[in-house]
Image (cartoon, rainbow, N blue to C red):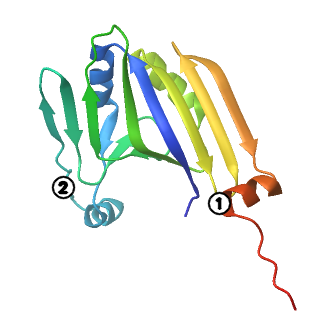
């Protein structure tokens, strides 16, 4: 079972490019029963994705969240609300972003290029103790920092050590 890097994933681009990503770049994840059927090579049901759009927003819902297509086990929550702004550049935050182990920058370079999106990722993996910060614009890496925690970082995150007197 992997450790999970958790944090934020923000997309910036035109309204049309973000809508195209939501349509093509996310796949609804299976519930546990259908995951087992899939692994056993049995027929299984694809989950429903509910989409509703108004003049001001696009809402996308999948009961068990979404897999980010083209990644090695990256997921986000199943409730996405893309609120349209009166700007050329739109912004969408994918809540509940998580990826097994560490974020693989190359996967997001491909997504950025394919959908013409700028991507901002900030994660931490508290089990092994690391942080990652990535910025990709127009398919080019602007920032890709990975930091392993020191003992002081662990203490700050988990609280100070407990000392038991004998």
Q: Position of residue 25 (x, y in %)?
A: 34, 31
Which residue sits at x=30%, y=41%? 27
Q: Residues within 10 Å of mark 2 (few under 14, many from 20)?
A: few
In the picture, which quadrant includes the C terminus?
bottom right
Tell me residue 57's x, y (percent): 20, 26
The picture quadrant where one finds residue 151 is bottom right
Q: Is residue 66 left or right of residue 120?
A: left
Where is residue 14? Give x, y as percent.
34, 13
Specify which label sits upstream in the sequence, 2 or 1. Answer: 2
Q: 150 or 47: which is nearer to us?
A: 150
Q: Is residue 42 left or right of residue 3?
A: left
| Side (left or right) of 109 relative to 85 | right
Q: How much space separates mark 2 and mark 1, taking CA atoms?
A: 34 Å
Task: Tell me what residue is drawn at x 82 percent, y 78 percent.
Answer: 163
Q: How many neighbours does mark 1 have within 10 angstroms: few (below 14), some (14-19), or many (20 or more)?
A: few
Q: Which mark is residue 127?
A: 1
Q: Is residue 110 left or right of residue 140?
A: left
Q: Quadrant of the N terminus?
A: bottom right
Residue 140 percent coordinates (x, y): 59, 15
Which numbered tag is attached to residue 45? 2
Q: Secondary structure at mark 2?
A: loop
**On screen, residue 12 above or below 64:** above
- Mark 2 touching mark 1, by CB under 8 A? no
User: Is residue 161 or residue 143 the one in the foreground?
Assistant: 161
Closer to viewer: mark 2 or mark 1: 1
Q: Residue furthest front?
A: 165
């Amino acid at each position: 079972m992997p450790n999970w890097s958790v944090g934020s994933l923000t997309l910036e681009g035109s309204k049309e490019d973000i809508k195209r990503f939501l349509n093509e770049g996310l796949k609804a994840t299976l519930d546990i029963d259908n995951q087992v059927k899939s692994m056993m090579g049995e027929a299984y049901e694809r989950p429903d994705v509910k989409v509703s759009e108004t003049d001001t927003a696009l809402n996308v819902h999948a009961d068990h969240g979404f897999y980010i297509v083209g990644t090695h086990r990256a997921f986000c929550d199943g409730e996405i609300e893309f609120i349209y702004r009166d700007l050329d550049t739109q912004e969408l935050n994918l809540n509940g972003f998580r990826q097994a182990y560490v974020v693989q920058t190359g996967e997001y370079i491909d997504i950025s290029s394919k959908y013409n999106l700028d991507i901002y990722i900030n994660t931490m993996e508290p089990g092994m103790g690391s942080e990652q910060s990535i910025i990709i614009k127009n398919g080019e890496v602007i920032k890709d920092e990975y930091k392993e925690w020191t003992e002081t970082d662990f203490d700050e995150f988990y609280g100070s050590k407990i000392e038991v007197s004998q």
